[in-house]
Amino acid sequence: MRQYLDLCQRIIDEGVWVENERTGKRCLTVINADLTYDVAAGEFPLVTTRKSFYKSAIAEILGYLRGYDNAADFRKIGTKTWDANANDNEAWLANPYRKGDDDCGFIYGKVGRNFPKPDGGSIDLLRKIIDDLTNGIDDRGEIYTFYHPGAFHMGCLRPCMYSHHFSLLGDTLYLNSTQRSCDVPLGLTFNMVQVYFLLAIIAQITGKKPGKAYHKIVNAHIYEDQVELMRDVQLTREPLPLPVLKINPAIKTLEDLETWVSTDDFEVEGYQFHDPIQYPFSV
């Protein structure tokens, strides 16, 4: 929690104004931020200086693990985060690759679970990672990536947090997640939960001990219509004790994640938080 607030304060104090062409808004921006989450110690990084909706964040990453490409599917598992990008993005609405209402195109997990091969066909990157880790294999390339520049035009949004690199040291699993761009007031509260959750759940289904998750953000920013709320409201609040994430121990395989698992299989204990803050969202 403190490292999140320190990053927010750094952006307020040191950020440079940058015009964002996609949204038509200015952002206060800093380059390079590193956050660490100790999954082994159970330090669940859920923001406490405002209410944060962790189940929506978990639902979104479940959709990435399942390879979803439709906002309706994301809604069914508990998140509306893809509604606007699928249906309100003018450039995507005019894109010939769009298949209709709620279609997101070739995005995130759809890419990672169907990564195109130059010689034809595709590779399920996640399946390989799960198989390798379950068998104690780490080839230094256990990377679940959503980043495919040759396919950006086929989706409604380029991936922001685009790479998740798993590493084994003995029977302890680590994660390095890289994010090219981050809306810190809104997106980062989700992304912190997702990085922690991803290491915790992959460790559980591969039979490994979770270690630490390292979260690299390249471009961290606060939009101009968010600055006042961050500076004058959220940064004046004292953080509260971190809660604990509880994961259903019956989840044992990738197939479980793909089929019956829902957000009801994840709960937090001891979550204390300040009042919600309604930050504007930029499409």
Image (tube, rainbow, N blue to C red):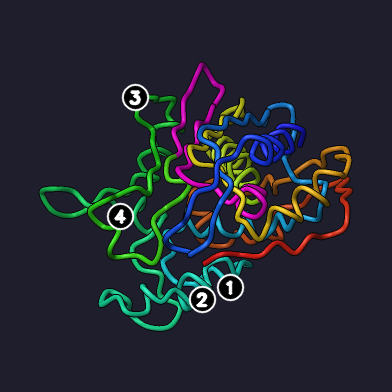
Residue drawn at x 29%, y 50% is 148
Rounded to the nearest angstrom, the CA distance separating label 2 from label 4 is 20 Å
Local SS, label 2 = helix
Badge 4 vs badge 3, beta-carbon distance below 8 Å: no
In this view, the residue farthest toward the front is 17
The amino acid on which the numbered mark 1 sits, given as a three-letter code, is Lys
Which numbered circle lies on residue 280?
none
Q: Is residue 239 left or right of residue 21?
A: right
Residue 162 drawn at (x, y percent): 43, 45
Packing grade of label 3 (10 A; few <14, some 14-19, many >=20) is few
Q: Is residue 98 left or right of residue 276?
A: left
Local SS, label 1 = helix
Q: Which residue is mark 2?
A: 72
The amino acid on which the numbered mark 2 sits, given as a three-letter code, is Ala
Which numbered circle lies on residue 114?
4
Q: Which residue is mark 3?
A: 139
Magenta-span inclusion, residue 223 = no
Residue 158, by quadrant, is: bottom left
Check the image and report above or below for 105 versus 192. below
Check the image and report above or below for 257 versus 13. below
Q: Which residue is mark 1?
A: 76
Residue 18 drawn at (x, y percent): 50, 49
- Observer-nearest residue: 104 or 277? 277
Packing grade of label 4 (10 A; few <14, some 14-19, many >=20) is some
Residue 102, by quadrant, is: bottom left
What type of secondary structure mainly makes up the magenta span?
strand
Looking at the image, is mark 2 or mark 4 earlier in the sequence? Answer: 2
